[in-house]
Image (cartoon, rainbow, N blue to C red):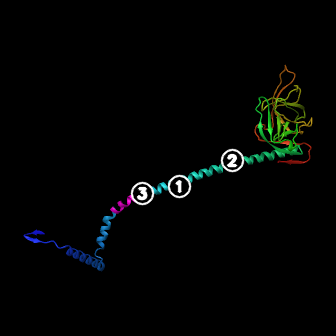
Amino acid sequence: MINVLGWTLRAPSVVTRLVLVVGMSVGLMIADYKGQHLERIRVGLSIALYPLQVLAAVPAALGSGAVDFFTTKNTLQGSNAKLHEENLALSSKLQQYDALEEENNRLRKMLGSAARVADRALVAELIEVSNEPFTRRILIARGDRDSAYVGQPVIDAHGIVGQITQILGSHSRVTLLTDPGHAIPVLVNRNGLRALVFGTGDPDELRVPYLTSVADIREGDLLVSSGMGGTFPPGYPVATVTKIVNDPNESFLEIHAQPVARLNHSKEVLLVWPGAGKKTEKK
C-alpha cells in the first residue's frame, strides 16, 4: 500500500495489472494497424539501435574475415607450391629435351661425316675414361658381337679419335690420338706433304716430328689421314698445326698440333668399316 496526502492507496492486483497490460497491447496493435501510428517510433528506434547492431556484428565479421584470410592464404600457398613443383618438373623435361636434341644433332653430324670416308659406321657409347697418367684410352660399349676388331678406326663428327687396341667381350678399349704410343700417317691438306703425327700424353696436343726447315708446312695447316697402312680412311681430318719452332741447333722442326676431334666433349664415337659395303647404322 502507498500513502498519498493521507490517502491510502492499494496497488492493483496482479490480475488487474495483467488485464490492463493486455488491453493496452491490444489497443496499440489496433491503432497501429488502422493508422500506422507506431511506424515513426519503430524507425526512430531502428536508427538509434543501428550502431549497437553494427558493434554486435563486428566480432562475427572479424572471425569470418580471419577464417577467410587464413583459408585463402593456405590455399594460395598450396597452389604456389604445386605450381613450383610443376615448373621444376617441366624445366627438367625441357633440359632433357635440349640434351636429346643436341645428342641427335651430334649423331647426325657423325653419321654424315662417316658416310664420306667409310661404307659402314656404328655408333658406340663411351662408358669409361682411363685414369692412368700420360695414357689416353677410353672404353666403349661395342665388342665381338658388333664385329669390332683390333685396329679399327674410331672417329667423331670432326676428326679421327683413335683406334681399337683391345676387344673385351662386349666392350672395346680405344687408344686415342693423344696417347704417347699412338702414331698416324697424315698429309698436309694444302699441298699433300707426307708426315707422321704422334701423341704426347697431353689431351690437347700432338707433335709432328722428322720434318726439316725446308718442309712446306705452316701454322694453321690442316693435317688429314693419308690412308697409308690401311688402318684409317684417307682424307679425314686429324689435327691442325698450332706452332712451329725452327731451332738452328736442331736438325728437325718442332711442330705442335691440336686434334680436330673433340676428344673430351662427346659421349659417343663412331666405329667405321672402310670398304665393308654401303651401310650406316645405330643399334
Magenta: main secondary structure equals: helix
Query: What separation in Å lies between label 1 and label 2 (alpha carbons)?
Result: 30 Å
User: Residue 83: where, in percent of width, then height?
Assistant: 59, 52
Query: Residue 145 falls in which quadrant of the image?
Result: top right
Horizontal arrangement in the rendering, residue 94 relative to residue 163 (left or right) = left
44 vs 233, left or right, is left
What residue is drawn where x is 58% and y is 52%?
82
Calculate the distance from the C-alpha at mark 2 to the C-alpha at mark 3.
48 Å
Residue located 80% across and 46% down the image:
107
Asked if residue 150 lies left or right of residue 30, the reply is right
| Dot 2 or dot 3, earlier in sequence | 3
Residue highlighted by disc 2: 95
Expressed as whole percent of the image width and height from the top left, the position of residue 77 reads: 53, 52
Residue receiving disc 3: 63
216 and 260: which is toward the camera: 260
Q: Position of residue 70 (x, y in %)?
A: 48, 54
The magenta segment is 52-60
Please tell me whether mark 3 sits on a helix, a strand or a loop. helix
246, above or below 94, in the image: above
Which of the labelled discs sits on residue 75, or is there none? 1
Residue kind at label 2, given as amino acid type = Gln
